[in-house]
């Protein structure tokens, strides 16, 4: 069903405007969308609602905040209920099960749309950057109204107007971009903390990973834009920022003025109201001595580093194109622990990579024991078409991979519980993030080292820093008491 005809001038991916021109154009489309939304509300007797569902990583979570910001500006009422008049799935394609989850949920949306044909469904994010996915949606999910990719998310106001005034599926997916459009409206999930993109894309081409293909080449934002954004967030009550990038340690490459990631961190540290700085993700190959030195003395950089290892076997690391060996990684960890003794380390590990054997998995298990991670995210290898590893022959059966995976998981859980026990009885500063999901007499706080602690306190303290004594070690989190 058409909402109404409007006058708009769509443009194709070959036509480009400057970042400033683009911001002005999209503002114009926000106003056009506002008219459509208002007319819809008058006709239907209710303000249309919109629900944005996020799959995947922090990058996607931040993109969803931008989508919500735009929807909110255009007059949609935001909800978490997929019965909404407009549902947007911001998808992830890092593993096949992420894709399958989206297809499954689209089936449910289809049933809802059968009951209410005016319901609109949009798909965006990493999954739709795959040509095969778009073909499949066109073929089997033709009820979807709008598909747009990761490179043109800033065109969302324009695409919204196109979708609301058309009966046909609107598809606008680009295979690459060099544009970074600043100043999109943003609706933040938390009032006191925020993610901040410092770079987009990835150039590392780990052989298993689809991210470089769906997010494009690495592009760093100008430091002055990042600082301007964080200053605005700080003025708005944010005290904790998470600097986001697929490989933050290579921040600054390609920018006209020379700046490194630690250089950027020093600029962020100067902003008074910012009390905590986090970042994600670090790559062991690019993490510099300058960063270790800065972390050792910094009052604001959190005592947590997510340092994905992927495997403890040098042979597999080579096949993954990770650019470091087991020994190199362990040496880096040793230097980090020496310089920052209270640092909590977490990691990502893949099991079942082509060519992997039980001996390789044993090496990974022995590395986990040696490093003593505070937590580790373990994944079963998922072949992604178009990546080099997808062409490599399998070496283990599904059952063998599962057996190796379970062994690793047990080791991760035992090591983490032991490791985390070093905080027993200690008193730490926690930032209260909100009411506990399972018990509303409790709140959940996050320590500088990223550990969660649940304790009795009033939810009005959300966003405040309090001292908490850690009483009961639950493995990956604590039950505590506010002092
Ligand atoms: N840029 C980050 C992580 C990106 S994806 C980094 O380099 O570490 C997050 C995690 O998903 C990766 O660390 C990896 O462990 C996992 N992952 C990526 N591709 C995968 C695949 N094809 N199969 C299984 N796990 C995968
Ligand atoms: Fe993927 Fe490797 Fe880039 Fe991380 S560094 S996003 S794992 S290609
Ligand atoms: Fe997934 Fe895309 Fe992030 S593939 S992990 S949402 S960059």
Image (cartoon, rainbow, N blue to C red):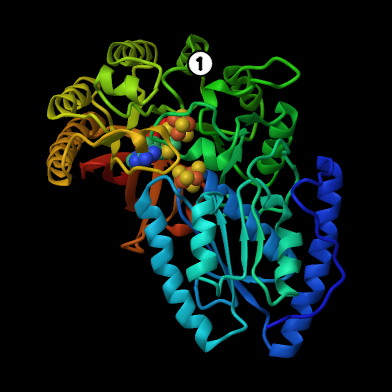
What's the residue at 32%, 14% (across, down)? 325
Residue 237: percent from left, percent from top: 63, 46
Pick the front one: 161 or 377: 161
The mark total stands at 1
| Left or right of residue 402, residue 91 in this image | right
Q: Is residue 27 above or below residue 350?
A: below
What's the residue at 53%, 81% (across, down)? 113
Pick the front one: 295 or 434: 295
Q: Is residue 327 above or below residue 349?
A: above
What's the residue at 81%, 60% (across, down)? 10
> Is any part of residue 239 visible from this angle?
no
Q: Which residue corresponds to mark 1?
A: 291
> Is any part of residue 349 visible from this angle?
yes
SS at circle 1: helix
Residue 347: percent from left, percent from top: 33, 31
Quarter-of-image position of residue 134: bottom right
Badge 1: residue crowd in 10 Å (few <14, some 14–19, many ≥20): some
Residue 88: percent from left, percent from top: 56, 65
Pick the front one: 288 or 278: 288
Residue 470: percent from left, percent from top: 27, 39
Q: Quadrant of the C terminus?
A: top left
| Left or right of residue 338, residue 74 in this image | right
Indicate if the residue with disc 1 has its beta carbon within 8 Å of ligand 1: no
């Amino acid at each position: 069903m058409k909402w109404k005809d409007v006058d708009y001038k769509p443009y194709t991916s070959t036509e480009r405007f400057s970042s400033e021109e683009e911001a002005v154009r999209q503002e114009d489309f926000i106003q056009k969308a506002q008219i459509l939304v208002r007319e819809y509300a008058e006709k239907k007797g209710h303000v249309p609602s919109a629900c944005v569902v996020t799959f995947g990583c922090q990058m996607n979570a931040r993109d969803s905040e931008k989508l919500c910001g735009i929807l909110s500006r255009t007059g949609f009422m935001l909800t978490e209920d997929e019965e909404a008049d407009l549902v947007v799935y911001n998808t992830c394609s890092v593993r096949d099960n992420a894709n399958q989850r989206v297809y499954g949920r689209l089936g449910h949306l289809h049933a809802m749309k059968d009951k209410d044909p005016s319901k609109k469904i949009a798909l965006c994010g990493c999954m739709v950057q795959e040509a095969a996915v778009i073909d499949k949606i066109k073929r089997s999910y033709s009820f979807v109204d709008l598909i747009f990719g990761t490179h043109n998310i800033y065109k969302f106001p324009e695409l919204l107007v196109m979708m609301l005034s058309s009966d046909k599926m609107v598809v606008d997916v680009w295979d690459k971009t060099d544009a970074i459009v600043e100043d999109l409206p943003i609706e933040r999930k938390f009032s006191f903390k925020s993610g901040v993109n410092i770079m987009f894309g990835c150039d590392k081409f780990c052989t298993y990973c689809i991210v470089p293909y769906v997010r494009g080449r690495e592009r760093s934002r100008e430091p002055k834009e990042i600082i301007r954004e964080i200053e605005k967030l700080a003025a708005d009550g944010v005290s904790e920022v998470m600097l986001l990038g697929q490989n933050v340690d290579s921040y600054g490459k390609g920018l006209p003025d020379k700046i490194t990631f630690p250089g950027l961190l020093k600029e962020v540290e100067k902003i008074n109201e910012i009390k905590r700085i986090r970042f994600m993700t670090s790559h062991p190959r690019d993490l510099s001595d300058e960063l270790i030195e800065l972390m050792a003395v910094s009052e604001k950089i959190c005592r947590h580093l997510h340092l994905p290892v992927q495997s403890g076997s040098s042979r597999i690391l080579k096949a993954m194109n990770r650019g470091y060996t087991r020994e190199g990684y362990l040496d880096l960890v040793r230097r980090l622990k020496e310089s920052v003794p209270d640092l909590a380390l977490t990691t990502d590990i893949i099991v079942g990579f082509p060519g992997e054997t039980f001996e390789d998995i044993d090496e990974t298990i022995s590395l986990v024991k040696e490093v003593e991670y505070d937590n580790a995210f373990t994944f079963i290898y998922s072949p992604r078409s178009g990546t080099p590893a997808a062409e490599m022959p399998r070496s283990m059966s599904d059952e063998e991979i599962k057996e190796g995976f379970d062994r690793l998981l047990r080791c991760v859980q035992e090591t983490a519980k032991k490791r985390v026990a070093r905080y027993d009885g200690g008193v730490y500063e926690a930032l209260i993030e909100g009411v506990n999901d399972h018990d509303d007499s409790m709140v959940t706080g996050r320590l500088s080292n990223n550990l969660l602690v649940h304790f009795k306190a009033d939810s009005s303290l959300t966003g405040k820093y309090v001292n908490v004594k850690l009483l009961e070690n639950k493995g990956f989190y604590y039950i505590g008491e506010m002092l």
